Image (cartoon, helix red, strand yellow):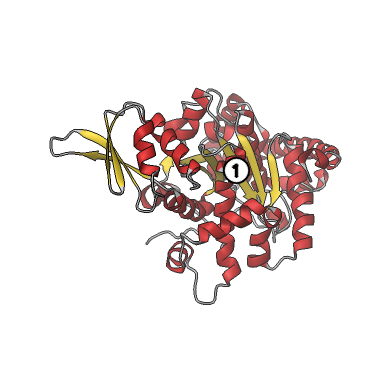
Amino acid sequence: MNMKLDPWGSVNIDDYSKLFDEFGILPFEDICSELPDPHRYMRRKIIFGHRSYDLITDAMKNKDPFSVMSGFMPTGGGHLGHKMVMEEIIWHQKMGADAFVGIADREAYSVRGISWEKCRQIGIEDYIVSLIALGFEPNGHIYFQSESDNVKELTFELGSKTNFSELSAIYGFSGETSVSHMTSTLSQSADILQPQLSEYGGPKPTVIPVGADQDPHMRLTRGIAHKMNMFRIEGREDKNKDKYFSVRSKAAPEGALADVAERLPWDTKLFEGHVDVFGADDYSKLLNTVREVEIEYGGYAFVPPASTYHRFMSGLQGGKMSSSVPESIISLKDDPKAAAKKVKRAKTGGRMTLEEQKKLGGDPNNCSAYELLMFHLVEDDKELEEIYDECVCGKRMCGTCKALAAELMTEFLTEHQEKRELAKDRLDDYGL
Ligand code: SF4
């Protein structure tokens, strides 16, 4: 049966490997070794997949500009799942990315019916304040979709390249779906492409860290980015099997293709609607020259966005984390003592009796307490490995893990909430 990913539904993706086969997402572990100091989510395969992340590792290596962008729908209650995205954005910002965070209030308004006022309040209180407390630097950009002229204008432009059938095929929209809901998908595409507008330095690789359920947005946006570009570059082969490139455009303004041909340092041949390029030994130069001309002639030029995909944490009681079941999640605003109690009641992979646990070992792969340690609370890989090994060989009892997780969670939340108070006084630095 085909998998369907639904960013607004409740999906439980239990076999991530299917995503590689069905949607063409690539395994992150193949590219992780190219990063000098990967984030713990990367080292621990919590980030399991990517699209085009090689563009980002290349940009990091060559010290070329690149961006990171992600967003939050202000529906209430920033929790540990949101913290994952925040950390991924902040990590890329530290690695040199120009960082963008959008509060998807247009989506919350159109899909969930949340008022604009409430969207703003939740956006700041539950997401932005925690983002700043976790280390987001003021040289990044935080904005509300409804207040960004860039996003609104780009949404309209992107709409001219998209139709109902495409949106339906990706999201399963029906005749009952409101036009605002449909438009909100394009607002998200505009969010994703915004870092490449000329006022932010023009086209550049951009990575979007998301949970796997958000892949439909990535597929839509990557398709639109291709369609928005004035030129298409194709690798071609003649009958003698000699390879060359062809820069093609059906609708480029007069003179634009001739300009491309003139500026390239290789042999070129100009035809109606395309220019062929022979002997090009520097693809980046070819790409950049073509983009330069695109922009000069008033067109858009977007690098199709890259993405990373992380696994979801399970709920503290097993099953799915859900904001409507407070016992299943740790909110970033939870009272630290109450949170510690939740941790102590978490479902573990322990056996029925201590004797059995000693004899058979526990199952850390099905254990919410271990997940908390792995995702959030233990930074040292060796220490985590020891906990794992001790568990599976029956040397470790669940009470020890829960006590450790509860103590570390209390420390984290106490410190985070102190930093949140400081962040509230720094909103001005972020233009809010
Ligand atoms: Fe989980 Fe620790 Fe129990 Fe193992 S010993 S199942 S890691 S709580």
Total numbered badges shown on the rendered structure: 1
- Mark 1, Cα crowd under 10 Å, few <14 / some 14-19 / many 20+, is many
Measured as percent of width and height from the top left, residue 52 is found at 44, 39
Residue at the spot 38% in from the left edge and 60% down from the top edge:
2
Measured as percent of width and height from the top left, residue 24 is found at 38, 47
Residue at the spot 43% in from the left edge and 63% down from the top edge:
166
Asked if residue 386 is positioned above or below residue 21 in the image, the reply reads above
Measured as percent of width and height from the top left, residue 317 is found at 65, 53
Residue at the spot 60% in from the left edge and 43% down from the top edge:
69
* Along the line of sight, the residue nearer the viewer: 406 or 168: 168
Q: In this view, does 283 lie to the left or right of 338?
A: left
Look at the image and tell me whether residue 15 can be seen.
no
Name the image quarter holding residue 202. Answer: top right
Residue pointed to by mark 1 = 69
Asked if residue 310 is positioned above or below residue 278 in the image, the reply reads below
Look at the image and tell me whether residue 87 can be seen.
yes
Farthest-out residue, left: 240
* Along the line of sight, the residue nearer the viewer: 262 or 107: 262
Measured as percent of width and height from the top left, residue 331 is found at 74, 49
* Along the line of sight, the residue nearer the viewer: 181 or 198: 198
Residue at the spot 63% in from the left edge and 49% down from the top edge:
71
Q: Is mark 1 on a helix, strand or loop?
A: strand
The amino acid sitting under disc 1 is: Met
